Protein backbone atom coordinates (compact mmCIF):
# COMPACT_ATOMS: atom_id res chain seq x y z
CA UNK A 1 0.00 0.00 0.00
CA UNK A 2 2.87 2.34 0.79
CA UNK A 3 4.43 1.76 -2.68
CA UNK A 4 1.10 2.41 -4.38
CA UNK A 5 0.78 5.73 -2.57
CA UNK A 6 4.29 6.84 -3.67
CA UNK A 7 3.56 5.92 -7.29
CA UNK A 8 0.33 7.88 -7.21
CA UNK A 9 2.15 10.98 -5.96
CA UNK A 10 4.85 10.72 -8.71
CA UNK A 11 2.21 10.43 -11.43
CA UNK A 12 0.42 13.48 -10.07
CA UNK A 13 3.65 15.53 -10.18
CA UNK A 14 4.39 14.47 -13.81
CA UNK A 15 0.86 15.37 -14.95
CA UNK A 16 1.11 18.77 -13.25
CA UNK A 17 4.46 19.45 -14.94
CA UNK A 18 3.06 18.59 -18.36
CA UNK A 19 0.14 20.91 -17.81
CA UNK A 20 2.48 23.79 -16.93
CA UNK A 21 4.53 23.15 -20.09
CA UNK A 22 1.45 23.30 -22.27
CA UNK A 23 0.42 26.58 -20.71
CA UNK A 24 3.76 28.32 -21.61
CA UNK A 25 3.40 31.28 -23.95
CA UNK A 26 4.34 30.67 -27.61
CA UNK A 27 7.65 32.50 -28.48
CA UNK A 28 7.38 35.59 -30.68
CA UNK A 29 8.84 35.74 -34.24
CA UNK A 30 12.54 36.67 -34.21
CA UNK A 31 13.68 39.95 -35.90
CA UNK A 32 16.52 39.39 -38.34
CA UNK A 33 19.42 41.91 -38.12
CA UNK A 34 20.22 43.56 -41.46
CA UNK A 35 22.06 46.56 -42.88
CA UNK A 36 20.24 48.91 -45.22
CA UNK A 37 20.78 51.77 -47.66
CA UNK A 38 18.53 54.27 -49.38
CA UNK A 39 17.80 54.45 -53.09
CA UNK A 40 19.62 57.58 -54.29
CA UNK A 41 18.85 59.63 -57.39
CA UNK A 42 21.89 61.30 -58.97
CA UNK A 43 23.81 61.89 -62.20
CA UNK A 44 26.06 58.91 -62.92
CA UNK A 45 28.93 58.93 -65.45
CA UNK A 46 28.97 55.84 -67.65
CA UNK A 47 32.46 54.44 -67.91
CA UNK A 48 34.48 51.73 -69.58
CA UNK A 49 36.96 50.12 -67.18
CA UNK A 50 40.22 48.37 -68.03
CA UNK A 51 43.74 47.66 -66.78
CA UNK A 52 46.31 50.05 -68.23
CA UNK A 53 50.07 50.23 -68.42
CA UNK A 54 51.92 53.50 -67.82
CA UNK A 55 54.42 54.43 -70.53
CA UNK A 56 56.80 57.39 -70.83
CA UNK A 57 55.72 59.94 -73.42
CA UNK A 58 59.23 59.68 -74.86
CA UNK A 59 62.24 57.53 -74.03
CA UNK A 60 65.83 57.87 -75.26
CA UNK A 61 68.75 55.48 -74.97
CA UNK A 62 71.77 57.76 -74.78
CA UNK A 63 74.75 56.37 -76.72
CA UNK A 64 78.16 57.76 -77.51
CA UNK A 65 78.85 58.98 -81.07
CA UNK A 66 82.60 59.21 -80.43
CA UNK A 67 85.01 56.61 -79.08
CA UNK A 68 87.33 57.34 -76.19
CA UNK A 69 87.71 57.40 -72.42
CA UNK A 70 84.69 58.59 -70.42
CA UNK A 71 86.15 61.46 -68.42
CA UNK A 72 83.16 62.65 -66.35
CA UNK A 73 79.52 61.95 -65.56
CA UNK A 74 77.67 65.20 -64.78
CA UNK A 75 74.58 63.78 -63.04
CA UNK A 76 73.58 61.19 -60.47
CA UNK A 77 71.48 58.14 -61.27
CA UNK A 78 67.78 58.90 -61.00
CA UNK A 79 68.24 62.67 -61.41
CA UNK A 80 65.81 64.82 -63.36
CA UNK A 81 67.63 66.41 -66.30
CA UNK A 82 66.64 69.24 -68.65
CA UNK A 83 66.91 69.28 -72.42
CA UNK A 84 70.44 70.35 -73.39
CA UNK A 85 71.93 69.61 -69.95
CA UNK A 86 75.45 68.15 -69.95
CA UNK A 87 75.47 64.41 -69.18
CA UNK A 88 78.88 62.98 -70.13
CA UNK A 89 82.32 64.17 -71.25
CA UNK A 90 84.56 61.96 -73.41
CA UNK A 91 88.30 62.71 -73.59
CA UNK A 92 88.43 65.45 -76.30
CA UNK A 93 92.22 65.64 -76.79
CA UNK A 94 92.53 63.25 -79.76
CA UNK A 95 89.70 65.07 -81.54
CA UNK A 96 91.15 68.49 -80.76
CA UNK A 97 94.42 67.38 -82.32
CA UNK A 98 92.61 66.13 -85.44
CA UNK A 99 90.76 69.44 -85.72
CA UNK A 100 93.96 71.48 -85.45
CA UNK A 101 95.58 69.40 -88.15
CA UNK A 102 92.57 69.82 -90.43
CA UNK A 103 92.59 73.59 -89.83
CA UNK A 104 96.31 73.75 -90.63
CA UNK A 105 95.81 71.85 -93.88
CA UNK A 106 93.01 74.21 -94.77
CA UNK A 107 95.14 77.27 -94.09
CA UNK A 108 97.99 75.90 -96.24
CA UNK A 109 95.76 75.00 -99.16
CA UNK A 110 93.89 78.32 -98.97
CA UNK A 111 97.24 80.08 -99.39
CA UNK A 112 98.01 77.90 -102.42
CA UNK A 113 94.56 78.67 -103.83
CA UNK A 114 95.14 82.41 -103.50
CA UNK A 115 98.44 82.03 -105.36
CA UNK A 116 96.82 79.91 -108.09
CA UNK A 117 94.02 82.45 -108.56
CA UNK A 118 96.54 85.28 -108.74
CA UNK A 119 98.42 83.34 -111.41
CA UNK A 120 95.22 82.83 -113.34
CA UNK A 121 94.38 86.53 -113.15
CA UNK A 122 97.79 87.42 -114.62
CA UNK A 123 97.50 84.84 -117.36
CA UNK A 124 94.04 86.18 -118.28
CA UNK A 125 95.72 89.36 -119.58
CA UNK A 126 98.70 87.57 -121.09
CA UNK A 127 96.66 85.15 -123.16
CA UNK A 128 94.62 88.04 -124.58
CA UNK A 129 97.85 89.64 -125.81
CA UNK A 130 99.19 86.33 -127.09
CA UNK A 131 102.14 86.52 -124.69
CA UNK A 132 101.43 82.92 -123.58
CA UNK A 133 99.99 79.97 -125.39
CA UNK A 134 96.50 78.73 -124.78
CA UNK A 135 97.90 75.42 -123.64
CA UNK A 136 99.92 77.11 -120.90
CA UNK A 137 96.92 79.24 -119.92
CA UNK A 138 94.76 76.11 -119.68
CA UNK A 139 97.27 74.53 -117.33
CA UNK A 140 97.15 77.60 -115.05
CA UNK A 141 93.34 77.50 -115.02
CA UNK A 142 93.36 73.78 -114.18
CA UNK A 143 95.81 74.36 -111.33
CA UNK A 144 93.53 77.05 -109.87
CA UNK A 145 90.48 74.75 -110.09
CA UNK A 146 92.40 71.91 -108.47
CA UNK A 147 93.51 74.21 -105.66
CA UNK A 148 89.88 75.29 -105.15
CA UNK A 149 88.81 71.62 -104.92
CA UNK A 150 91.55 70.87 -102.39
CA UNK A 151 90.38 73.78 -100.22
CA UNK A 152 86.80 72.54 -100.38
CA UNK A 153 87.93 69.08 -99.22
CA UNK A 154 89.99 70.64 -96.42
CA UNK A 155 86.97 72.63 -95.25
CA UNK A 156 84.87 69.48 -95.17
CA UNK A 157 87.59 67.67 -93.21
CA UNK A 158 87.82 70.53 -90.72
CA UNK A 159 84.02 70.57 -90.33
CA UNK A 160 83.98 66.82 -89.75
CA UNK A 161 86.75 67.12 -87.16
CA UNK A 162 84.77 69.89 -85.43
CA UNK A 163 81.69 67.67 -85.43
CA UNK A 164 83.60 64.71 -83.97
CA UNK A 165 84.94 67.00 -81.23
CA UNK A 166 81.40 68.13 -80.39
CA UNK A 167 80.43 64.48 -79.81
CA UNK A 168 82.78 64.47 -76.82
CA UNK A 169 80.12 66.46 -74.93
CA UNK A 170 76.94 64.42 -74.58
CA UNK A 171 73.87 66.47 -73.65
CA UNK A 172 70.34 65.41 -72.80
CA UNK A 173 68.07 65.33 -75.87
CA UNK A 174 64.93 65.79 -73.72
CA UNK A 175 63.65 66.78 -70.30
CA UNK A 176 63.08 63.68 -68.21
CA UNK A 177 64.37 61.36 -65.51
CA UNK A 178 67.53 59.29 -65.81
CA UNK A 179 67.77 55.60 -65.03
CA UNK A 180 70.75 53.59 -63.86
CA UNK A 181 74.22 54.19 -65.33
CA UNK A 182 75.53 51.45 -67.61
CA UNK A 183 79.06 52.88 -67.98
CA UNK A 184 81.00 54.79 -65.35
CA UNK A 185 83.74 57.43 -65.59
CA UNK A 186 87.16 56.03 -66.51
CA UNK A 187 85.83 53.34 -68.84
CA UNK A 188 86.35 53.30 -72.58
CA UNK A 189 83.24 53.85 -74.69
CA UNK A 190 82.71 53.06 -78.36
CA UNK A 191 80.79 55.04 -80.89
CA UNK A 192 77.30 53.61 -81.49
CA UNK A 193 77.82 50.80 -79.01
CA UNK A 194 74.80 48.54 -78.44
CA UNK A 195 74.81 49.27 -74.69
CA UNK A 196 73.42 52.74 -73.90
CA UNK A 197 75.19 54.93 -71.37
CA UNK A 198 71.86 55.73 -69.69
CA UNK A 199 68.14 55.68 -70.51
CA UNK A 200 66.05 58.84 -70.03
CA UNK A 201 62.25 58.69 -69.72
CA UNK A 202 59.98 61.68 -70.12
CA UNK A 203 57.34 61.37 -67.40
CA UNK A 204 55.74 64.83 -67.50
CA UNK A 205 53.46 64.27 -69.30
CA UNK A 206 53.03 60.51 -69.40
CA UNK A 207 50.68 58.19 -71.27
CA UNK A 208 48.68 55.12 -70.27
CA UNK A 209 47.93 52.36 -72.78
CA UNK A 210 44.91 50.08 -72.31
CA UNK A 211 42.63 47.89 -74.43
CA UNK A 212 38.86 47.53 -74.59
CA UNK A 213 36.67 44.86 -76.25
CA UNK A 214 35.78 45.53 -79.87
CA UNK A 215 32.04 45.60 -79.08
CA UNK A 216 32.58 48.76 -77.02
CA UNK A 217 34.18 50.71 -79.86
CA UNK A 218 30.95 52.53 -80.66
CA UNK A 219 31.07 54.19 -77.23
CA UNK A 220 34.51 55.77 -77.79
CA UNK A 221 34.46 59.57 -77.96
CA UNK A 222 37.35 61.76 -79.21
CA UNK A 223 39.29 63.32 -76.33
CA UNK A 224 37.20 61.44 -73.77
CA UNK A 225 38.06 61.93 -70.11
CA UNK A 226 40.18 59.08 -68.73
CA UNK A 227 40.98 58.42 -65.08
CA UNK A 228 43.89 56.33 -63.81
CA UNK A 229 43.88 56.12 -60.03
CA UNK A 230 43.46 59.74 -58.91
CA UNK A 231 45.00 61.16 -62.09
CA UNK A 232 42.88 62.62 -64.89
CA UNK A 233 43.86 62.63 -68.54
CA UNK A 234 42.53 62.73 -72.07
CA UNK A 235 42.15 60.03 -74.72
CA UNK A 236 44.71 60.86 -77.43
CA UNK A 237 45.12 57.69 -79.52
CA UNK A 238 42.89 54.93 -80.90
CA UNK A 239 44.63 52.17 -82.85
CA UNK A 240 43.65 51.73 -86.50
CA UNK A 241 42.87 48.01 -86.21
CA UNK A 242 41.50 45.42 -83.81
CA UNK A 243 43.87 42.78 -82.47
CA UNK A 244 42.54 39.59 -84.10
CA UNK A 245 44.05 37.41 -81.37
CA UNK A 246 42.21 39.08 -78.47
CA UNK A 247 39.33 40.93 -80.13
CA UNK A 248 40.40 44.17 -78.43
CA UNK A 249 41.54 47.57 -79.63
CA UNK A 250 44.42 49.53 -78.09
CA UNK A 251 43.94 53.08 -76.80
CA UNK A 252 46.25 55.60 -75.15
CA UNK A 253 45.49 58.51 -72.86
CA UNK A 254 47.85 61.35 -71.97
CA UNK A 255 48.19 62.63 -68.39
CA UNK A 256 50.00 65.83 -67.28
CA UNK A 257 51.45 63.84 -64.32
CA UNK A 258 52.81 66.92 -62.57
CA UNK A 259 52.53 65.19 -59.20
CA UNK A 260 54.37 62.08 -60.50
CA UNK A 261 51.43 59.86 -59.43
CA UNK A 262 51.96 57.66 -62.50
CA UNK A 263 55.27 55.89 -63.11
CA UNK A 264 56.50 54.16 -66.28
CA UNK A 265 55.87 50.42 -66.17
CA UNK A 266 53.14 50.71 -63.54
CA UNK A 267 49.80 48.89 -63.98
CA UNK A 268 46.74 50.99 -63.10
CA UNK A 269 42.96 50.75 -63.12
CA UNK A 270 41.65 52.89 -65.98
CA UNK A 271 38.16 54.38 -66.32
CA UNK A 272 37.08 56.14 -69.51
CA UNK A 273 33.94 58.26 -69.37
CA UNK A 274 31.82 57.65 -72.46
CA UNK A 275 28.43 59.08 -71.42
CA UNK A 276 26.36 60.22 -68.44
CA UNK A 277 22.97 59.03 -67.12
CA UNK A 278 21.12 61.93 -65.50
CA UNK A 279 18.86 61.45 -62.44
CA UNK A 280 19.69 57.75 -62.27
CA UNK A 281 18.37 55.59 -59.40
CA UNK A 282 21.36 54.03 -57.64
CA UNK A 283 21.68 51.37 -54.92
CA UNK A 284 24.70 49.52 -53.56
CA UNK A 285 25.45 46.58 -55.85
CA UNK A 286 25.43 44.16 -52.89
CA UNK A 287 21.69 44.90 -52.37
CA UNK A 288 20.84 43.21 -55.69
CA UNK A 289 20.11 39.47 -55.52
CA UNK A 290 19.45 37.02 -58.34
CA UNK A 291 16.70 34.41 -58.19
CA UNK A 292 14.75 32.12 -60.52
CA UNK A 293 12.63 35.04 -61.72
CA UNK A 294 15.56 37.43 -62.21
CA UNK A 295 17.05 40.17 -60.08
CA UNK A 296 15.37 41.45 -56.93
CA UNK A 297 15.94 43.41 -53.73
CA UNK A 298 14.34 43.40 -50.30
CA UNK A 299 12.60 46.71 -49.59
CA UNK A 300 12.06 47.69 -45.95
CA UNK A 301 8.44 48.71 -45.31
CA UNK A 302 6.84 50.53 -42.32
CA UNK A 303 6.92 48.44 -39.17
CA UNK A 304 10.23 46.87 -40.22
CA UNK A 305 8.52 44.45 -42.57
CA UNK A 306 10.20 43.57 -45.87
CA UNK A 307 8.97 43.18 -49.40
CA UNK A 308 10.71 41.14 -52.08
CA UNK A 309 10.75 43.46 -55.12
CA UNK A 310 11.67 42.42 -58.67
CA UNK A 311 13.88 45.03 -60.38
CA UNK A 312 15.74 45.66 -63.62
CA UNK A 313 19.42 46.70 -63.45
CA UNK A 314 20.73 48.92 -66.25
CA UNK A 315 24.43 48.58 -65.38
CA UNK A 316 26.70 47.88 -62.42
CA UNK A 317 29.61 50.31 -62.08
CA UNK A 318 32.06 49.49 -59.34
CA UNK A 319 30.11 49.15 -56.08
CA UNK A 320 26.91 50.75 -57.40
CA UNK A 321 24.01 49.38 -59.47
CA UNK A 322 21.95 51.67 -61.71
CA UNK A 323 18.28 50.66 -61.56
CA UNK A 324 16.07 50.86 -64.64
CA UNK A 325 12.78 50.15 -62.89
CA UNK A 326 11.27 48.61 -59.77
CA UNK A 327 12.41 51.17 -57.17
CA UNK A 328 11.77 54.80 -56.27
CA UNK A 329 14.10 57.40 -54.83
CA UNK A 330 14.14 57.42 -51.02
CA UNK A 331 13.09 53.78 -50.54
CA UNK A 332 15.18 51.63 -48.20
CA UNK A 333 16.75 48.37 -49.39
CA UNK A 334 18.54 45.63 -47.50
CA UNK A 335 22.26 45.43 -48.26
CA UNK A 336 23.33 42.61 -45.94
CA UNK A 337 21.44 39.71 -44.32
CA UNK A 338 19.20 38.86 -47.29
CA UNK A 339 19.88 35.11 -47.07
CA UNK A 340 17.82 34.80 -43.87
CA UNK A 341 14.89 36.86 -45.14
CA UNK A 342 11.49 35.81 -46.44
CA UNK A 343 8.62 38.04 -47.56
CA UNK A 344 7.06 37.63 -44.03
CA UNK A 345 10.22 38.45 -42.11
CA UNK A 346 10.68 41.29 -39.68
CA UNK A 347 14.05 43.06 -39.64
CA UNK A 348 16.17 44.83 -37.10
CA UNK A 349 18.32 47.52 -38.72
CA UNK A 350 21.92 47.47 -37.54
CA UNK A 351 24.08 50.53 -37.36
Image: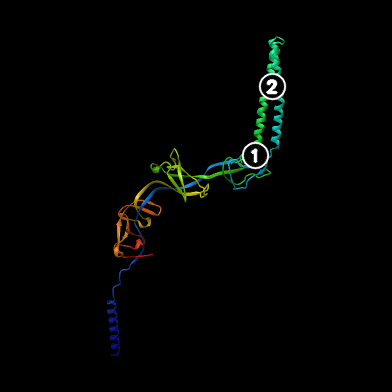
Q: In the rendered view of the protein, which quadrant contains the N terminus?
A: bottom left
Q: How is the image coloured?
A: rainbow
User: Left or right: where does residue 331 sit relative to residue 154?
Assistant: left
Instruction: Judge whether 112 appears above or below 199 on screen.
Output: above
Within-10-Å neighbours for mark 1: few <14, some 14–19, many 20+: some
Q: Position of residue 153 (x, y in %)?
A: 66, 26
Which residue is depicted at the point 44% across and 46% down?
Answer: 226
Quadrant for the C terminus in the image? bottom left
Q: Which structural element holds mark 1?
A: strand
Residue under pointer 1? 169
Between 66 and 331, the residue placed more toward the observer is 331
Where disc 2 sits, the SS reads helix
Count of marks placed on residues: 2
157 in relation to 138, above or below: below
Residue 44 is marked as none
Residue 234, percent from left and from top: 45, 44
Residue sitting at 55 percent across and 42 percent down? 59
Q: Nearer the viewer, residue 284 or 190?
A: 284
Residue at x 70% of width, y 35% of height: 96
Toward the bottom, the furthest residue is 1
Mark 2 is surrounded, within 10 Å at the Cα level, by few (under 14), some (14 to 19) or many (20 or more) other residues, namely many
- In this rendered view, identify the residue nearer to me: 215 or 39: 39
On the image, the x and y values in percent for residue 151 come to 68, 25
Up/down of 2 relative to 261, above or below: below
260 relative to 283 in the view: left or right: right
Q: Which residue bears the numbered disc 2?
A: 147
Q: Please identify the quarter of the rendering in which residue 24 is found.
A: bottom left
Look at the picture and state if 53 lies above or below 300.
above
**Residue 122 at what x, y percent from top left?**
71, 15
Q: Which residue is outermost to the top?
A: 130
Of label 2 and label 1, which has the lower sequence position? 2
Q: Is residue 280 left or right of residue 68?
A: left
Amino acid sequence: MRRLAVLTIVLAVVVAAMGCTEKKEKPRDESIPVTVAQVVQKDVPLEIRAIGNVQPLSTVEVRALASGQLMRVWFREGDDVARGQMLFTIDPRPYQSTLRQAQANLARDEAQLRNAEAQRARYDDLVKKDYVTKEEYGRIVADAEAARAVVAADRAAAENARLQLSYCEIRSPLTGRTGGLQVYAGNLVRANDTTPLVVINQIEPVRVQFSIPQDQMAAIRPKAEVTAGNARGTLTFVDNSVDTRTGTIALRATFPNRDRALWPGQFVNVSMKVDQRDDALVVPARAVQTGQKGQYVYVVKPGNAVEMRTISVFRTIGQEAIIDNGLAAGETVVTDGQLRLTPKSKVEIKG
